[in-house]
Image (cartoon, grey):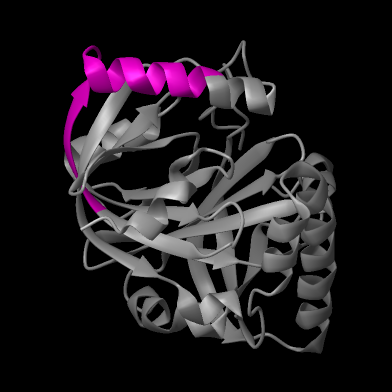
Amino acid sequence: MLPREVLPALQGIVPSVIATASADGTPNITGLSQVFHVDDRHVALSNQFFSKTARNLAENPYAVVQLIHPETVRMWLLDLRFVRSEREGPVFDAMAMQLEAIASMQGMEDIFRLRAADIFEVLSVRELREASGS
Amino acid sequence: MITQALMDHFATPVSIAVGTVTDGRPVFLRAFGLDARLGAGELTIYVPVVTAGPTLAGLEHAKQASVSVVNVENFQGFQLKGEVTSVAPAGPEAEATIDRIQTRMVESTAKMISPAFSQGWGRFVTRPAVALTLRVREIFQQTPGAGAGERIA
């Protein structure tokens, strides 16, 4: 489900963006430090400052994440459905370690702290080929 | 509602992400330009036609949009939420704005990420564009840190 060509866009070099919606249809859009490859059908998103996003997902489990390849600038949209939050375990530990590296790269060592690894099922992947101009 | 601080922010190299809702599901759009007036309660964003098509139909019903505007050099950001009040083709003045912001982004991403990324960003198809005007209802702080998510207006 998650094509290999998308994986470089998960390195955290280019911040991703997540869109969610509340039950009353109000969208929320915010930056995302980390999209972590769990397996071919699941990704984990770093929950750091996600108060509104978390509230929306409790009401409406669907989300869209935009990924950008750090070299080619190819752009993908992942349609996701929230599954669960993990606050410990191997995925959380691996994400916490990777987030430290991302924070260091972006000068955010004192700010980025992983609160939870939010696990999502990948429903579909769309590349925005028409946008890339190549 | 659009303060001088916001106007100053909009003049930096900004990445503009847009969220809307269609059939109860969130939708993502990328905008490549924006315009606002000091003291006004409206924000206009420019979304390329090549990616906006299906979403525009959804906006006829939902009308709600959220716009995240982030300075790519220091990650300072704001989210503006409101109701879409007009959807119209972007004219020549808007295209000049898109080109100016695109040029800033190309220059900044060359420094912040890489020359290859910067060249790719410069190839995005930004025209023709659609101008979406929002009546801004709420503004939130989005800079990473303790104040992230705080409503400021």
> Is A99 a magenta residue?
yes
Total number of numbered labels? 0
Q: Residue at x 57, y 45 (%)?
A: B79
**Percent position of residue B4, x then y:** 84, 44
Q: Does A13 sit above or below residue A54? A: below
Name, please, the residue furthest toward the front: A4
Quick check: A46 left or right of B143?
Answer: left
Please state the extent of the stretch shown in magenta in the rendering.
A80-100
Which residue is rendered at x = 85% and y = 68% of the image?
B100
Asked whether, in this view, residue B42 is left or right of residue B18, the answer is: right
Query: In the shown orientation, is residue A10 left or right of residue B61?
Result: right
In percent of width and height, residue A61 lies at 19, 45
Pick the residue in front: B85 or A117.
A117
Q: Quadrant of the C terminus of chain A?
A: bottom right
- Quadrant of the image containing the N terminus of chain A: bottom left
Q: Quadrant of residue A76?
A: bottom left
| Residue B7 against residue A88 in the figure, above or below | below
Name the residue nearer the viewer: A55 or B153: A55
Q: Residue B106 occupies which quadrant of the picture?
A: bottom right
Q: Is residue B131 visible?
A: no
Tell me where residue A78 appears, x and y as whole percent: 32, 57
- On the image, the x and y values in percent for residue B27 come to 36, 63
- The quadrant in which residue B120 appears is bottom right
Residue at 50 percent across and 34 percent down: it is A33
Residue A89, compared with residue B15, is above or below; it is: above
